[in-house]
């Protein structure tokens, strides 16, 4: 018979002390959200642009890392202002 998974006491305490997801928005001091993607993620680019994000900058990665697939790839940063719900 399969026993239900148990969480540690630390995890249980943490769950009740911290909201998840954490609050984001003007009500807690955030004014905008910035997202980035690469030229390889065309669906992400289309989603950001169709959702009202504005292109902040384009850069070309110089090195390969866990965040950049390969050197020479274009990366795009988008920003969208957050507005308080009213």
Image: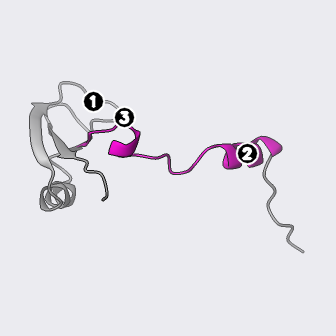
- Residue highlighted by disc 2: 11
Residue at the far right: name it: 1
The span picked out in magenta is 9-35
| Image position, residue 30 (x, y; %) | 33, 38
For the point 27% across and 39% down, which residue is it? 31
Tell me the distance, in whole angstroms, between the alpha carbons under discs 2 and 3: 28 Å
Res. 6 mark: none
Helix, strand or loop for disc 3:
loop
Query: How many residues crowd mark 2 within 10 Å: few (<14), some (14–19), many (20+)?
Result: few
Q: Is residue 9 left or right of residue 30?
A: right
User: Reading the chain from its start, which is encountered first: label 2 or label 3?
Assistant: 2
Query: Viewer-proximal residue, 67 or 10?
Result: 10
Q: Residue 4 is drawn in which quadrant?
A: bottom right
Query: How many residues crowd mark 1 within 10 Å: few (<14), some (14–19), many (20+)?
Result: few
Discs 2/3, front: 2
Res. 64 mark: 1
Residue at the far front: name it: 86
Q: Locate the N terminus and report the quarter of the image it occupies.
A: bottom right
**Magenta stretch holds residue 81:** no
| Image position, residue 23 (x, y; %) | 46, 47
For the point 80% across and 46% down, which residue is it? 8
Label 2 close to label 3 by CB (< 8 Å): no
Q: Is residue 52 left or right of residue 22?
A: left
Query: Viewer-proximal residue, 23 or 48?
Result: 23
Res. 66 mark: 3
């Amino acid at each position: 018979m399969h026993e239900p998974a148990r969480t540690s006491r630390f995890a249980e305490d943490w769950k009740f002390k911290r909201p998840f997801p954490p609050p984001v928005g003007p009500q807690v001091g955030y004014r905008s959200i910035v997202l980035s993607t690469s030229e390889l993620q065309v669906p992400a680019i289309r989603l950001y642009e169709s959702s009202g994000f504005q292109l902040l900058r384009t850069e070309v990665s110089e090195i390969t890392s866990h965040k950049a697939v390969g050197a020479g790839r274009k990366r795009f940063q988008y920003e969208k202002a957050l507005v308080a719900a009213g």
